[in-house]
Amino acid sequence: MSILNKLQKLSLSEIQSKAYIALLQIGEGSALQVSRNANLPKSTVFETLKSLNGLNLISKRSQGNKNIFFVSDPRIILDNIKEQARTAEDILPELRGLYKAFNKNAQVRFFEGPKAIEIIINETLMEAKELKLIGSISDTVEFYPKYFPRFSIQRVKRKIPLRILTNDSETAQENILLDKRKLRTTKIIQNKEFSSMIWMWSGKIGIIATRGKQFAMVIDEPGIFGIQTAMFDLIWDSLPESKQY
């Protein structure tokens, strides 16, 4: 991933990122010099430099009748992120209160696109004391390749045990070999295919498409959760322990 893309992931716009990189490259300069180096219109760059100054990423001084801009220590980026995290922690209880009040009657939520799985992963990591999954491990890893290695690391770090019911595949057999290390138990359902994966945790059910269109839904309803987990446990108890070859 390029520096430009990484800066955008830190919530800078593309133009802000280009102007910031250009100023880093020349050390200091006027808006005109930055615009030439960044290949951006001067009028756009001047407003962009003002916004970067407001973020404390750059500073300016007067030289004659023009402003000269120069970069601050890039470590200020980390300081800004830490400050944002502290602010988020301060307001999170109030936001959660509003969220719960709004969602008392909103028991089913739908999400589309590649971020669908990320929403369910984040909720699981924040809320789950135990996690149950049923579906194709190989299809899920193939359909959402960038999310599951990171999810596995975070889940183990948070000590959330996982039980998986999955169809037989090379990926499933590789999973079984690492089960103990990954705080996980896997059981195989023979001769079955799945086109989605069901997650169960803390009174919620997440359904994630693993083929075709990327989408997910979350059902937050105790009765449905109870039936679904009872069915999971019934199937689980009927299957033999997986052998680690």
Image (cartoon, rainbow, N blue to C red):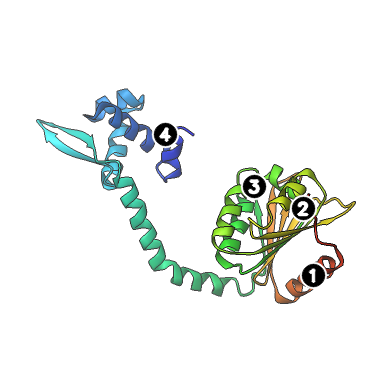
Residue projecting furthest to the front: 245
Quadrant of residue 90 within the rendered picture: bottom left
Total of numbered circles in the picture? 4
Q: Which residue shows up at 60% across the image and 50% down it?
A: 115
The residue under label 2 is: 244
Q: What kind of element bears circle 4?
A: helix
Quick one: label 1, few (<14), some, or many (20+) residues within 10 Å? few
Residue 58 vertical position relative to residue 84 in the rendered view, above or below: above
Q: CA distance from mark 1 to mark 3?
A: 31 Å
Indicate the amino acid at tag 1.
Asp
Q: Which label number is shown at residue 3?
A: 4
Work out whether 119 lies above or below 104.
above
Q: Amino acid at mark 4?
A: Ile
Q: Mark 2 vs mark 4: which is more N-terminal? A: 4
Distance Cα–Cα, label 4 vs label 3 = 25 Å
Amino acid type at circle 2 is: Gln
The secondary element bearing badge 3 is classed as: loop
List the single residue furthest toward the right: 191
Q: Nearer the viewer, mark 2 or mark 3?
A: 2
Q: Residue at x 54, y 59 (%)?
A: 157
* Residue drawn at 65 percent across, 43 percent down: 145
Mark 2–mark 3 Cα distance, whole angstroms, equals 36 Å
Q: Are discs 2 and 1 less than 8 Å apart at CB?
A: no
Can you identify the residue that label 1 sits on? Answer: 233
Question: Does residue 164 appear left or right of residue 39 in this picture?
Answer: right
**Tag nearer the camera, 2 or 1:** 2
